[in-house]
């Protein structure tokens, strides 16, 4: 086992932000053992835009939980930004998670009676950042997603696409190197989905943020530069897309909205 761990460590490059080696996840009940992940090996480089695709039961949600330090594998090894988080305690994984990962969810998860600016400030409150610095950084994050004119609007005063932009700004305000997006367009129409995907592509290309996006929709995955297809807890294919769909162009090519 020591030799295997040493071999895995030697395979990790400084350019690797994620290194998963033989990741297995089993859920054991009295009646049955569910093999959610079966010896998955994945390496993701800094600055990649990766789509993880699969239908319900494919293991992609379990993989997202492990990548996001929300769960631990049954077997295998996981290095995040060079840190071995495989067997860390819940508190220790929370520290790594809060420092290195920004999360974007399908349901936005915004506080309903709180302004966009205050929602974006929230992760900085947990870090003990001063009020003045919180406001400054939250404003910059909202400007980066094109919402400088919506600072004091509450979620019910924003469209679905605007709410997801606030959620992205909240994920970015701590300046994480890795952004995990779990079905970020699941509650959005096609036009708004391409708007959000266009924003993610800009953040990836201009800011060099590593993005891992979970989706079950092939047309959403087509906007990523790499697509990992999962089925039955295994990686069935891992392909690089030399010509990903440009979301802004795809939006422009849509037929005009009918009145």
Image (spheres, rainbow, N blue to C red):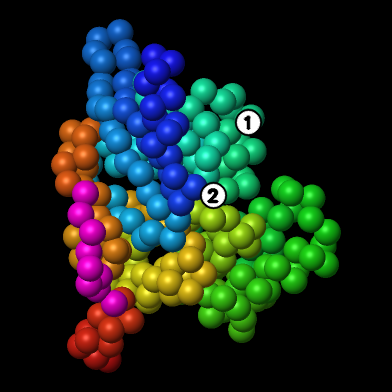
Question: Outermost residue toward the top?
Answer: 30
Label 2: which secondary element: strand
Residues in magenta? 238-246
- The residue under the point 69% across, 61% down is 121
- Magenta stretch: dominant SS? loop
**Mark 2 and mark 1 in contact (Cβ < 8 Å)?**
no
First-in-chain label (1 vs 2): 1
Q: Can residue 215 be seen in this view?
A: no
Where is residue 2 drawn, in percent x and y?
43, 16
Where is residue 248 drawn, in percent x and y?
33, 81
Where is residue 152 drawn, in percent x and y?
67, 75
- The residue under the point 18% across, 33% down is 232
Please state if 162 lies on the left or on the right of 235 as rendered.
Answer: right
Query: Callout 2 environment at 10 Å: few (<14), some (14 to 19), or many (20+)?
Result: many
Label 1: which secondary element: helix
Q: Name the residue under label 1.
A: 92
Query: Callout 1 environment at 10 Å: few (<14), some (14 to 19), or many (20+)?
Result: few
Please state if 135 lies on the left or on the right of 238 as rendered.
Answer: right
1 up-or-down from 109: above or below: above
149 up-or-down from 124: above or below: below
Q: Can residue 228 be seen in this view?
A: yes
Q: Name the residue under label 2.
A: 101
Which picture quadrant has residue 93?
Answer: top right
205 up-or-down from 99: above or below: below
- The residue under the point 39% across, 71% down is 201
Please state if 63 lies on the left or on the right of 59 as rendered.
Answer: right
Q: Quadrant of the C terminus?
A: bottom left
């Amino acid at each position: 086992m020591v030799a295997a761990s040493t071999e895995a460590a030697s395979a990790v490059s400084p350019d690797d932000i994620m290194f998963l080696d033989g990741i297995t996840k089993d859920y054991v009940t009295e009646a049955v053992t569910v093999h959610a992940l079966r010896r998955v090996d994945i390496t993701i480089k800094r600055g990649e835009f990766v789509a993880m695709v699969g239908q319900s039961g494919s293991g992609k949600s379990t993989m997202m939980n492990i990548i996001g330090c929300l769960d631990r594998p049954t077997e295998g090894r996981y290095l995040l930004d060079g840190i071995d988080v495989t067997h860390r305690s819940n508190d220790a994984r929370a520290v790594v998670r809060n420092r290195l990962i920004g999360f974007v969810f399908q349901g936005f998860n915004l506080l309903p009676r709180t302004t966009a600016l205050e929602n974006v400030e929230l992760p900085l409150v947990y870090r003990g950042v001063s009020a003045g610095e919180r406001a400054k950084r939250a404003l910059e994050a909202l400007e980066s997603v094109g919402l400088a004119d919506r600072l004091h609007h509450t979620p019910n005063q924003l469209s679905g696409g605007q709410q997801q932009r606030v959620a992205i700004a909240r994920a970015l305000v701590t300046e994480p190197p890795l952004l995990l997006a779990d079905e970020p367009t699941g509650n959005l129409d096609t036009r708004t989905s391409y708007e959000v995907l266009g924003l993610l592509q800009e953040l990836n290309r201009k800011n060099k943020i590593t993005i891992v996006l979970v989706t079950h929709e092939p047309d959403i995955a087509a906007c990523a530069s790499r697509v990992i297809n999962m089925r039955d807890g295994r990686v069935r294919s891992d392909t690089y897309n030399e010509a990903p769909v440009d979301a802004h162009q795809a939006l422009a090519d849509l037929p005009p909205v009918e009145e």
